[in-house]
Image (spheres, rainbow, N blue to C red):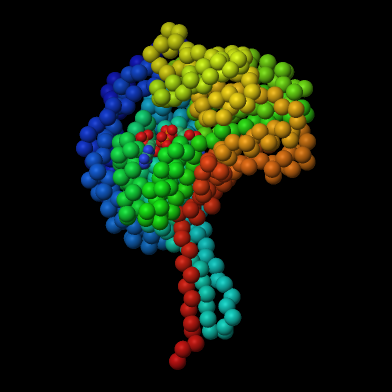
Amino acid sequence: MTSQAAPQTLISGSLVIAGRAVAGAAADEVTDPATGTVIGIAPVSSDEQVDDAVQSAAQAFGPWAALPATKRSAHLTAIASWIRQHAADLATTLTLEQGKPRSEAVGEVDAAAKAFDYYAAEAVRVRGETIPTGSPTLRSVAIRQPMGVAAAIGTWNYPLGIMAWKIAPALAAGCTVVAKPAEQTPLTVLAVVAGAADAGLPPGVLNSVSGTGAEAGARLASHPLVRKISFTGGTATGRRLLHMAADDIKSVTLELGGHSPMIVLADAPMDLAVADAVKRSFRNAGQLCNSVNRVFVQRSVAEQFTERVTERAAKLTLGHGLADPEPNLGPLTTADGLARVEAHVADARARGAQIRTGGSRATDGELAGGLFYQPTVVVGDGELLMAREETFGPVVPVIVVEDADEAVARANSLDAGLVSYLYTRDLRSATLLSERLEFGTVNVNNVGGGDVPFPYAGWKHSGLGIELSRAGMEEYLRVKHIRTELGYQ
Ligand code: NDP
């Protein structure tokens, strides 16, 4: 593995308020989770800067909402182009602050550009309706208008991708935005917000604040001029924001924690099920809201499936995301995340579960300075902590079930309802089982998803509202009914 040193010069982020680059009231170090070295300096917003950012978004709202949709669309296209022009640097920064392998960072940057392209096309498709009335002189029209200032609060596992899923539809709808990235991974998002200003976005339309969620995030979300909160993160924070929004009757879209089940039935296409289980349990070191968090496998194929997943998991490589050759997994992004993984594995051991591979930190050689954990396959029962709570790490528990009914009942037994996976060759039964799964997304024989054309919604405690697709833009629009009497003298 090629050794990875810290960058020669620290990557420096700045805020954008009213179109101008602004230093924070304080500064915070950003650390590479693969080495523990400081790779950048991020601004920390003061309360006044958060207020200024919201004010500037509020001032920009009227003109931006009134701009013809074709012009707003052109601005989104310009942001997509800026992202593509700077993709290489953005991907390197993303790997350095978040830890993911560089090719995955490149993919995330590309997905962000695609989100701006997609909503550039949707911006000109905001439609209203004409409703027939009971009178020849009465007209009734429902139009859709933007909500106002949107607060976009994102998390650290897909910092840029998730933020693009908020900013792009909000701008397309005619909202102005204040974006707050997670404090662990602010640099890529801050760079894109600054890039949008360089790409000609009018001042105030897109602003950034930075700092902790408890301070900058809460100040932003509770600001009375913010009319929309779009949040991705943990369920506990989402609940807190919902309470906060209630005071001002703000509109809220929440994408929260998941606990995705993968159901593997006896007639599953086994090569595919094994490959997908490995892909979706360990990608981004398991730090995915739609990671496979528990596998329910039918008894007759359980041992075969588990052996093959274990064999593949044991061969996955770990390393710095910029190393050559590229590793399969980078480190966990946060020390708290690593501690949670360790606690979940310790719980599994204490309950007598089998640890088929992994089960400890990876500390050999250059890995010693980073937050690495070995890909881990566990065989146990539904009582394991990891089978009930989101581990958000490279760990997957396999649980044996007798039939599809038991699998569906167990899958539905938690409060999480983001994504589920189902593997069977019987597409008739897959259709019927899909309708019984209480999840916003059901993937049958694939682990794709989280893709901009398709609606992404968390059911139960996994969210509120919809992200992505045309429906994702509608979350930033409100309906106005215009009722006009023409029959006057
Ligand atoms: P958190 O809820 O802790 O943080 C998410 C964001 O909210 C961060 O920007 C954080 O700021 C901010 N924040 C924290 N407290 C407040 C507050 N009181 N007011 C306003 N903002 C606040 O989430 P995690 O870091 O734990 O993120 C991981 C979670 O995100 C997992 O549960 C995962 O499943 C979920 N997730 C869901 C996705 C989905 O699409 N459903 C996609 C990806 C992740 P800071 O970090 O700077 O303190």
Question: What is the total number of numbered labels drawn onto the structure image?
Answer: 0
Residue at the extreme bottom of the image, as rendered: 489
Residue 267 drawn at (x, y percent): 78, 29
Residue at the extreme top of the image, as rendered: 365
| Residue 158 appears in the picture as rendered | no
Looking at the image, in which quadrant does ligand 1 appear?
Answer: top left
Answer with the quarter of the image where residue 386 lies.
Answer: top right
- At x 48%, y 82%, the residue is 485
- At x 64%, y 19%, the residue is 379
Residue 38 drawn at (x, y percent): 31, 22
431 lies left or right of 215:
right
- At x 64%, y 31%, the residue is 262
Nearest the viewer among 92 and 88 is 92
126 lies left or right of 156:
right
Residue 264 drawn at (x, y percent): 70, 29
Say if 122 sits above or below 483 in the image: above
Nearest the viewer among 415 and 232 is 415
| Residue 401 appears in the picture as rendered | yes
Quadrant into which the C terminus falls: bottom left
Answer with the quarter of the image where residue 35 lies.
Answer: top left
- At x 45%, y 8%, the residue is 364
Residue 404 drawn at (x, y percent): 74, 33
Say if 213 sits above or below 270 in the image: below
Nearest the viewer among 322 and 43 is 43
